Image (cartoon, grey):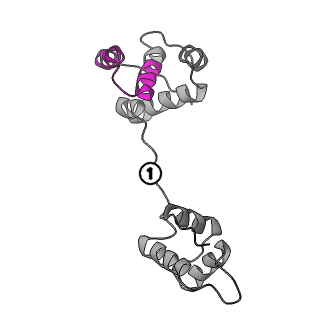
Amino acid sequence: MKHYVYLSDAQREELRKLIRVGEAPTRTLTHARILLKADQNGDGLKDQPIAEMLEVNRTTVLRVRQRFCEEGLERALHHLHPQRLKPPRLDSRAKAHLIALVCGPQPEGRSRWSLRLLADRMVELGHAEELSHETVRRVLKKANSSRI
C-alpha cells in the first residue's frame, strides 16, 4: 500500500523551522527532510530519489511515510523503540536465585556450573517453565558474574 504524505501549511512550517534551527537529533532532522520531500503538496518525490538525495536507505523513507500516515507527525519525526511484547523469562527474584546458584557450591561431579546445567536447574527449581542457556548467559553477563 502506498502512503502519500500531505502536509498542512502549519506542519510544513514546523518542519522547515526544525531544520532551520538544526538543534534536534540528526535522525529527527532527516525524517523532517524526508517528509518535506515526500509532501504531495510540494515536491512529492518517490522513495528512491529521496533516499539518494538524503543518503539514507529507501526503507527508511518508506517507514517514515508509513509512520506519518498511520500515526501522525510526532511519531514520524521521533523514532521510539518498540515496546517489548513478551514478558521477560526471568523476573528480578529469579535472576537473584540464578546468581545465588552460581555463587553456591558446584554441582555434584562437576568442577563448576555450565550454562546448560544452570538453565536446567532453574527449570527444576520452578523459576521458569523453560530457559535457554543463552538467557542464562545474558543474565550473568549483565550481573558481571565470572563464576562459570
Q: Nearer the viewer, residue 2 or 77?
A: 77
Work out which residue is located at the far left of the displayed protein and give it.
Answer: 10
8 left or right of 33 in image: left
Q: Where is the C terminus found, in terms of image quarters?
A: bottom right
112 or 9: nearer the eye? 112
**Is 131 covered by the magenta stretch?**
no
**What secondary structure is the stretch in magenta mostly built from?**
helix
Q: In the rendered image, which quarter is residue 72 located in?
A: top left
Q: Residue furthest top?
A: 43
Residue at (57, 68) in percent of width and height: 146
Residue that mark 1 sits on: 83
The vertical placement of 42 against 67, above or below, is above
Outermost bottom residue: 108
Q: Please tell me how crowded label 1 is: few (under 14), some (14-19), or many (20+) other residues with Cα within 10 Å.
A: few
Where residue 56 appears, as percent x and y from the top left, is 56, 23
Residue at image location 59% in from the left, 14% down from the top: 49
Q: Quadrant of residue 78?
A: top left
Is 96 or 40 nearer to us in this picture? 96
Amino acid at the residue labelled 1: Gln
**Residue 141 image position (x, y, % from top left):** 55, 62
Please provide percent x and percent y for residue 74. 35, 32
Q: Position of residue 122 (x, y in %)?
A: 56, 80
* Vertical position of residue 77 compared to residue 120: above or below: above
Q: Which residues are magenta?
A: 8-35
Task: Give the SS element for disc 1.
Answer: loop
